Amino acid sequence: MKAKSLLDLQEYFHNELVCAQYLEQMRWDGKPLCPHCGSEHHYRTTTRFKNPALKDYKDFLCKACGKKYTVITGTIYECSKVSLRTWLLAEYLIANHKKGISSLQLARDLGVTQNTAWFILHRIRASFKEDHEEKLTGITQIDETFVGGKNKNRHYDKKVKYVGREPSRVDKTPVMGLLNYGKVRLFAVKDTSYDELRGVINRNIELRSIIISDDLYSYRTLGESYMHFIVRHSAKRYRSKEGFSTNGIENVWSILKRGIIGIYHYVSRKHLQRYCDEFAYRFNTLSLTVVERFEDAIRRCGNARLTYKVLIS
Ligand SMILES: [Zn+2]
């Protein structure tokens, strides 16, 4: 598939059958696997998709477990009234808006209701989530930032009271970022306490590797388990004694904030992790071309783990 534009893509995916066949290729590399038991042995049955547009497409019947499946069983596209064609166009639009796309804009572009667009966005965002099985090694920059609603946009009984000089942080959610050789992991955390931040570090960074951070109090004992270099921001320093900086992760924050302010305006605490996953995905795939990012997004529809391996290989 060599789509240079949305028009090419629309012409290529001109009906549901083409979309289903394309998805088979992307999801399974042409070798269908039963999503129930993992077997590759199957029959093609005459029973058909409920979708009338797929009248020529046959279901799979697993020889091992006897269950039926289709190319969308176990994917984010399952159990929705949205056509495959709409899903694929949505993947393209979402994967290629550098700063993200609002549900309002997506609804307009796809000709669906805003509710449908919202649902599509959240499902696709969920597919961008990485499982972070491998710990980071080498040099990792870590930092936190605060994102969330602005007080002036709140209903009067939900406004947050000013506490001393720091009114803004009270109603905002901290996000912790780990930047390792150009790839970022983002976590919406409960607070910036020692326990909370240390938990993220222990789960994600290999012991004894190098960590660069600012002089936040919660990081004070990192040196016991890691090689810890500190940039003393409180003393207006921008490099550690050894010459390290946290410029990389601070650059991630400026992109994240531009996205949230410019596109999403207000991100609720509940959904923040999913937005973080989406931004991390965009950031980590910056070097991919439009078509590569689209194909990578499609491969994630059923198994994010597999695609991560494809991505980094
Ligand atoms: Zn099976």
Image (cartoon, rainbow, N blue to C red):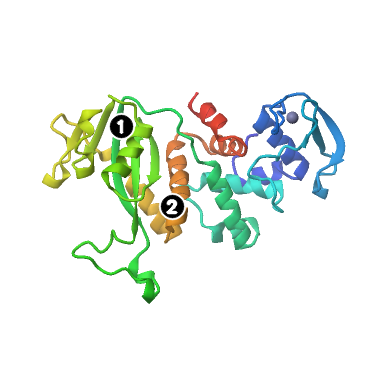
- State the residue in front, 270 or 112: 270
Specify the quadrant of the image occupied by residue 32.
top right
Q: CA distance from mark 2 to mark 1?
A: 23 Å
Outermost residue toward the left?
A: 235
- The answer to whether residue 7 shows anywhere in this view is no
Query: At label 1, which amino acid type do we have?
Result: Thr
N-term mark: 2 or 1 = 1
Instruction: Classify the position of ligand 1 by quadrant: top left, top right, bottom left or bottom right.
Output: top right
Judging depth in this view, the residue of 17 and 127 nearest the camera is: 127
Q: Residue at x 25, y 28 (%)?
A: 225
Q: Which residue is mark 1?
A: 140
Give whichever of 10, 38 is nearer the camera. Answer: 38
Circle 2 sits on which residue? 272
Q: Reply above or below: 244 against 72.
A: above
Residue 169 shows in the view: yes
Residue 113: horizontal and vertical position, in percent? 64, 62
